[in-house]
Amino acid sequence: MALSGRFVILFRPLRVVKVLTTAQRKTSHQNTVIPQKKIEHKFSNHLTTNAAKFSTKVLTEIEANEIRNSQNQCWNCGQKLSLMSKNFCENCESILPLAQDENYFSLLAIKKDFRVSLNELQFNFKKFQILLHPDKYTLKSETERNISETVSSFINKAYFTLLKPLSRGIYLLELHGEYMTEDVNSDDPEFLMEILSLNEQIAESDSIPEKRKVFNDVKLIVDDLTIKIAESFHGEDIQKAKQHLISYKYYDNILQKLKEMLPPV
């Protein structure tokens, strides 16, 4: 019995030691798996850092504009912008600031030319205003509201500039690096004498039919100048287009004056 007792005493510790060793090995194995998952998670976070920094930081409109134009990325999600990303990000659908090379023609999706379809201009204006109007962004972030206000204002200015032949022509001149200030004058003495004579005729006449005749005559001149301006721009003769626009400005002023004097037809 004493020998048996010794046998038990000798082998029980061995069994305990063996069990503990197995448990330690399992624990050790688990400990090597857990850090691996953490490393994988950390690596995954590293991959999404660029996108996360855009979505967590509240950007100003200026910062959003800088991201769009210097990095060609969406200010909200960090997605690279394609040529199709004009007003909205294709990935997160956030409204985008204006592209740096945007002009009135490209903004309203019409051909850059003096000849424009007024129906197309009006249709596109209404379409973009519905999509980008600030009223649609009242519940959005401050950044989106500010971008919407800027873009919508630019659309309004683009529409009313391109709507009238004179302002459209002056804007086209600017796109070609030529400028026509408000105080620009013609250097043609004969032309200036003709304009002076027309203004005197209008001022001295009390006859509605006579003023109506002057209006119709000047309207024909303006229509002819409109054709000449279009042809000059089409032929890339920018200086000639500028000369015609200066003449157009004088005659257009006379038309606007007569419109105020004449009763509606």
Image (cartoon, rainbow, N blue to C red):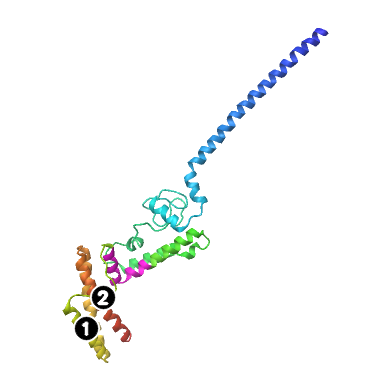
Query: Looking at the image, is 47 positioned above or below residue 164?
Result: above
Q: Quadrant of residue 133?
A: bottom left
Instruction: Please state the horizontal and vertical placement of residue 143, each as a whole percent of the image.
Output: 48, 58
Q: Nearer the viewer, residue 167 or 109?
A: 167
Secondary structure beneath dot 2 equals helix
Q: Is residue 24 left or right of residue 172?
A: right
Q: Who's the residue at 52% across and 50% down the image? A: 56
Q: Does residue 163 show up magenta in the picture?
A: yes
Query: Looking at the rendered structure, which numbered label has been put on residue 196?
Result: 1
Tell me the magenta residue range.
157-174
Closest to the camera, between mark 2 and mark 1, is 1
Mark 2 or mark 1, earlier in chain: 1
Q: Which secondary structure lies at badge 1?
A: helix
Say which residue label 2 marks: 249
Q: Amino acid at mark 2?
A: Lys
Q: Is residue 179 magenta?
A: no
- Residue at (38, 51) in percent of width and height: 70
Give the CA distance from mark 2 to mark 1.
Answer: 14 Å
